[in-house]
Image (cartoon, grey):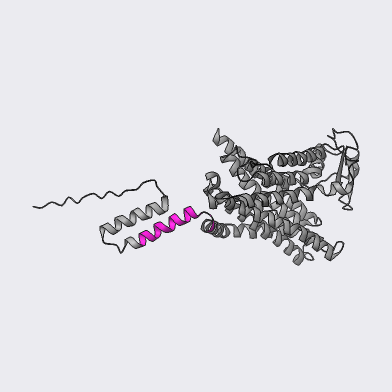
Amino acid sequence: MRAAATALVGAQFALGCAVAAYAASAILVGGRPGGLSLVILLAAYVPYAGVGSILVAKRPWNLIGWVLLGIGWTFAIGFLPMDATIEQLQTLTASPLQEVIAWLTKWSVSLTFALFAVLAFTFPTGRLAEGRWRPLVRLALTAIWGTVILSAFDPVLTIESPATGAGVEVPNPIGLLPPGIFDAIPPEILALVLPTILAASITAIAGRYARAQDLERLQLRWLVAAFGSIAIAVPTGFAILAASGPGGGAELAWVPAAAAFMLPPIAVGIAVTRYRLYEIDRLISRGLSWAILSGVLVAVYTGAVLLLQTALGGVIQGQTVAVAGSTLLAAALFQPLRRRVQAAVDHRFNRARYDAERTATDFADRLRDQMDLASVSGDIVGVVDTALRPTSVGVWIRPSTSTTP
């Protein structure tokens, strides 16, 4: 059963990678405004779903893995290309797949922020912290998830028009709620829902860090840094938009925020590898290195596509040559980057493996020049204790059986 569950988790991770890659290629080829930020968010699927898949496969009862997996999937499906026209969506004549994509586009963003709130309130144990604030936290999470569920079944979907980029209202094919359910709420308040959820999540993780002690504080430190980066990057995006004027910096304004949203799963991976959280540090070390490698290769691929399109746009027709050249470049860099990234991750985070290997190597070098048996015996005990941390250790040396004629 465990092998079948692991295979199923691996299959969904591969499927998510294919979905995110398809959406990224459609954004790049279609020249969608703000495409670079969207591609970075799509690439964020890899660290979220990578770390989440490992946690789900090895610790399925822990909520953190499922939350990371859910966030990864919201990034993968939230930017799928929509081929149906506005008229087809308004008259409910679009294909079922296009209706589903329009529905996911409507509420996947709010679902992402709700999952971030759960991560902030429950990491690292997967449960709400005990204390006098627990009822208030439950109330906040209930309000957040209630808003998300209501928006999913709202009779009206507001989607972005491919032609104008403005929001257009279309009927929700599964709008089970009565019409006008959100009409009593001022639009200004509705616009503040997602920023409020993000601010509450950042406040929650910062408050838990301030109250945490010892090992839990060290584990939370990395996630606090990741959420802090998001707290800085999002206002930076608004500042860039305000400074550049309408349409001036839209392409690059949200790149810092998109990159910051990739940090929480990496922070969870670091907490696992450095402080043996969930006792699967070696698996997370491998998953973290693959996530970093995937992110670097996606960045190289995206940059190469944009560069080749800019440099050769007047010579070639279409994007086939740019995509093919970028793919070959990413494939050529795969093995060298994999070795270097894995060595760097092991050196920095998987200290148990790195220190054990270094200790054994140093002992072998010393053994070449060691002649005294008592010193060798003591050195062996020290090396084994340092590298393996056994509960007890002893050395047995077979006595010599020299024979005399």
Q: Is residue 240 above or below residue 277?
A: below
* Rendering coords of residue 400 (x, y %): 19, 51
Q: Which residue is found at the position 31% from the left and 62% from the top?
A: 368
Q: In this view, does 201 lie above or below 313?
A: above
The magenta stretch spans residue 360: yes
Which quadrant is the N terminus positioned in?
top right
Q: Nearer the viewer, residue 202 or 4?
A: 202
Image-based side of 325 in relation to 180, left or right: left
* Magenta segment, prevailing SS (helix, strand or loop): helix
Q: Residue furthest left?
A: 405
Query: Is residue 265 visible to us here?
Result: no
Q: Is residue 67 above or below residue 24?
A: above
* Rendering coords of residue 57 (x, y %): 58, 40
Query: Is residue 267 visible to us here?
Result: yes
Q: Is residue 300 above or below residue 194?
A: below
Residue 229, quarter of the rendered image: bottom right
Image-based side of 134 in relation to 315, left or right: left
Residue 87, quarter of the rendered image: top right
The magenta stretch spans residue 402: no
Q: Magenta segment, which residues?
A: 348-365
Q: Nearer the viewer, residue 259 or 188?
A: 188
Image-based side of 103 in relation to 277, left or right: right
Q: Nearer the viewer, residue 319 or 345?
A: 345
Residue 365, quarter of the rendered image: bottom left
Q: Which residue is found at the position 32% from the left and 48% from the top?
A: 394
Q: Which residue is found at the position 33% from the left and 54% from the top?
A: 380
